[in-house]
Amino acid sequence: MKHLRLCLLLALTLTLPVQAAGQNPDEKVPAPQFRLTTLQGAPASLSDYRGQVILLNFWATWCGPCRKEMPSMERLWQTYRDQGLVILAIATDNGGESRIRNFAHRLGLSFPILLDPDSQASDRYQVSGIPVSFLIDRQGRITARIVGSKDWASEPALQHVLRLLQE
């Protein structure tokens, strides 16, 4: 029975729609800043992308739902990056740079991948499970927190991203 409840909870979590960051849907909270390293070894911080719409995604190579959503994230990135969309995929794997690099190469991922082996950014965003994504507007405010795998080509996800790109 315990496993059934856990499976039901997980299924519910994976199907949640895009949720507003706070109690009030119009409330936008400033996105916590961080400084990490890219998969290529360059420093990167959230403030480097100020003025752009950011899809901040926390994931790991061992996470099945994370692998499932990555192709739709890549398509979203390819379609809207010239309009001001940035995808920052924060890998939460511990010490697995070669594993992350192979994973990204195998899936043909071209958006920036940041490394968070010490959970610096994960802690600031209170990430307790993955995948979890945050949509951040051009002013650096969180507009949505999405728990679980998401089809980023779905109508609700596209509408939210397009609205942010037009603001």
Image (spheres, rainbow, N blue to C red):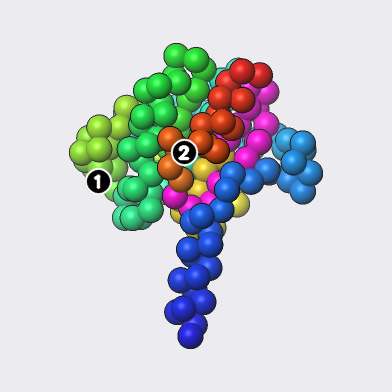
Q: Position of residue 17 (x, y in %)?
A: 57, 48
Examine the residues drawn in magenta and state their main secondary structure: strand
Q: Which residues are magenta?
A: 135-149
Q: Residue at x 37, y 23 (%)?
A: 78
Look at the numbered disc 2 and give the secondary structure of its residue. loop
Q: Residue furthest top?
A: 82
Which badge, 1 or 2, comes first in the chain's sequence? Answer: 1
Q: In this rendering, does residue 35 appear at all? A: no
Q: Position of residue 28 (x, y in %)?
A: 73, 35
Q: Which residue is mark 2?
A: 154
Q: Residue at x 77, y 38 (%)?
A: 27
The amino acid beneath tag 1 is Arg
- 26 relative to 131 in the view: left or right: right
Q: Position of residue 1 (x, y in %)?
A: 48, 85
In this view, 14 is above or below 1: above
Cα–Cα gap, marks 1 and 2 = 29 Å
Q: Which numbered marker is on residue 99?
A: 1
